[in-house]
Image (cartoon, grey):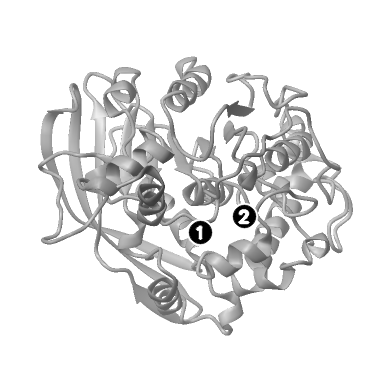
């Protein structure tokens, strides 16, 4: 089989047309485009400009959360409860030095007066031996848990598919990078961090018809389907479920880092914006609906992402297809909701479809909120400066969409800069 047919097999296996469009263009390394709008501390709807941190926390943050749900992501549950059905030790010395455990989970959620329940799903967790309460990187990937943490003891349903084995897997990693599905777990453990992973499609499938059906079933208490949450929001909620499970019976406080690439980079940001228990975010090449601005953007448009992935967002997002300049809210305000916690925004120069410049402008636009907290925010004036200790760290490397060998050392350098000092 020639390289080009295999390339299309790999793209199909990944299921990513959105932020994985191939291009020969290169992102400019200087900021290119107007400033993010509306100004993050300026007037917003009926609200006056933010004059103090109290204004921000008590008035503006709730207003932005409401606007993000109403216009882009759909609504989170009014309340929910996670049940840990089972927790068991799989291996005391997995991946060269980690304690591997598996959780069996189910969540009950309520929209309005209607209660529903997720399918049973699993979380696999490996933490470094000899590091009590190590920070845990919460990971969602395109592939099932048994590919993210490949270990023979990890539960795998009979006849279950996945990314492991077959020619498509080799080509997928060739095209999208060595770590597109499986992180360098030994390297992560050796640096003192744990890894927890779920496969979010176990409760919110990443397939148009099946995904929409599951999302509508879970949110059937809403008055209108226009309010229905999209998969990005459901997966963001999944990060919170992971924290809930890890907190139950924990020996002491620990830090949680939401990690995601591409579509899961979007949900990793949204999770931190709505869940203050998440200590930091690594959002790699999250693109449209993630870190990159909707207005004055390059690469993927709202129309393109809605046409390709109608289950990812609220139906209200469709209103802005071709009308992005009319949006009342933009992604710099999403980033601002995470302040003052550290955020890493990963990018690649040839991944113009994900709009690295739009992500950089969003990071600049969120800066005033970090300063309101007495933090720095973004600390660079070009895209190719690497400042891992910055509160908003911006990473850009050569190459295209994926997770490659250069990425994880940068991710860990960012985490070391923010957590080793603790």
* Residue at 67% from the left image edge and 62% from the top image edge: 302
Find residue 211 and report its horizontal and vertical position in percent.
Answer: 41, 71
Tell me if residue 338 can be seen: yes
Disc 1 vs disc 2: Cβ atoms closer than 8 Å?
yes
Identity of the residue furthest to the top in this view? 421
Q: Quadrant of residue 395?
A: top right
Where does the image place residue 20, in percent across and percent down from the top left? 52, 48
The answer to which of 349 and 344 lies nearer the viewer is 349
Q: How many marks?
A: 2
Provide the residue designation for mark 1.
232
Looking at this view, is 212 or 189 the one in front? 212
Residue 392 location, quadrant: top right
Q: Residues within 10 Å of mark 1 (few under 14, many from 20)?
A: many
Residue at 47 percent across and 39 percent down: it is 402
Q: State the residue in front, 263 or 247.
A: 263
Looking at the image, which residue sits at the far bottom? Answer: 223
Q: Residues within 10 Å of mark 2 (few under 14, many from 20)?
A: many
- In the image, residue 112 sits, relative to residue 333, either above or below, namely below
Looking at the rendered structure, the secondary structure element under dot 1 is helix
Taking the spot 32% from the left edge, 69% from the top edge, the residue there is: 118
Mark toward the start of the polypeptide (1 vs 2): 1
Residue behind mark 2: 289
Label 1 and label 2: CA atoms lie apart by: 9 Å
Residue 181 in view here: no
Q: Is residue 34 left or right of residue 216?
A: right
Secondary structure of the residue carrying numbered label 2: loop
Q: Quadrant of residue 158?
A: bottom left
Measuring from the top left, give residue 142's x and y in whole percent. Answer: 37, 50
Q: Which residue is rendered at x = 54% and y = 74% of the image?
A: 228
Vertical placement of residue 370 versus 267, above or below: above
**Nearer the observer, 71 or 106:** 71
């Amino acid at each position: 089989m020639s390289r080009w047919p295999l390339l299309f097999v790999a793209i199909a296996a990944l299921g990513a047309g959105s932020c994985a469009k191939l291009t020969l263009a290169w992102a400019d390394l200087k900021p290119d485009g107007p400033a993010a709008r509306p100004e993050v501390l300026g007037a917003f709807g009926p609200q006056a400009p933010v004059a103090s941190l109290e204004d921000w926390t008590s008035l503006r943050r709730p207003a932005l959360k409401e606007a993000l749900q109403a216009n882009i992501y759909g609504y989170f549950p009014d309340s929910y409860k996670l049940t840990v059905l089972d927790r068991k030790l799989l291996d005391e010395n997995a991946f060269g030095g980690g304690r591997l455990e598996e959780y069996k989970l189910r969540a009950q959620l309520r929209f309005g007066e209607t209660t529903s329940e997720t399918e049973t799903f699993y979380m696999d967790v490996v933490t470094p031996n000899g590091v009590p309460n190590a920070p845990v990187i919460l990971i969602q990937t395109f592939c099932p848990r048994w590919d993210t943490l490949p270990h023979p003891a990890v539960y795998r349903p009979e006849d279950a598919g996945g990314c492991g084995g077959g020619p498509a897997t080799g080509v997928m990693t060739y095209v999208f990078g060595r770590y597109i599905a499986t992180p360098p777990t030994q390297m992560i453990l050796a640096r003192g961090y744990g890894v927890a992973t779920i496969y979010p499609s176990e409760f919110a499938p990443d397939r148009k018809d099946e995904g929409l059906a599951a999302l509508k079933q879970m949110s059937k208490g809403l008055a209108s389907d226009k309010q229905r949450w999209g998969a990005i929001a459901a997966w963001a909620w999944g990060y919170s479920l992971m924290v809930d499970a890890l907190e139950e019976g924990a020996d002491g406080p620990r830090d949680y880092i939401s990690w995601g690439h591409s579509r899961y980079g979007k949900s990793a940001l949204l999770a931190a914006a709505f869940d203050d228990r998440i200590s930091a975010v690594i959002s790699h090449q999250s693109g449209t609906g993630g870190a990159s601005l909707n207005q004055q953007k390059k690469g993927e448009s709202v129309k393109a992402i809605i046409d390709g992935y109608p289950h990812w967002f609220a139906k209200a997002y469709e209103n802005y297809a071709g009308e992005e300049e009319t949006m009342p809210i933009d992604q710099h305000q999403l980033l601002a909701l995470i302040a003052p916690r550290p955020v890493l925004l990963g990018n690649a120069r040839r991944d113009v479809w994900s709009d690295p410049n739009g992500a950089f402008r969003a990071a600049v636009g969120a800066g005033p909120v970090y300063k309101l907290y007495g933090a720095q925010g973004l600390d660079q004036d070009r895209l190719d400066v690497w400042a891992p200790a910055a509160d908003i760290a911006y990473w850009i490397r050569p190459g295209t969409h994926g997770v490659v060998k250069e990425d994880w050392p940068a991710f860990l350098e960012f985490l070391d800069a923010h957590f080793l000092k603790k």
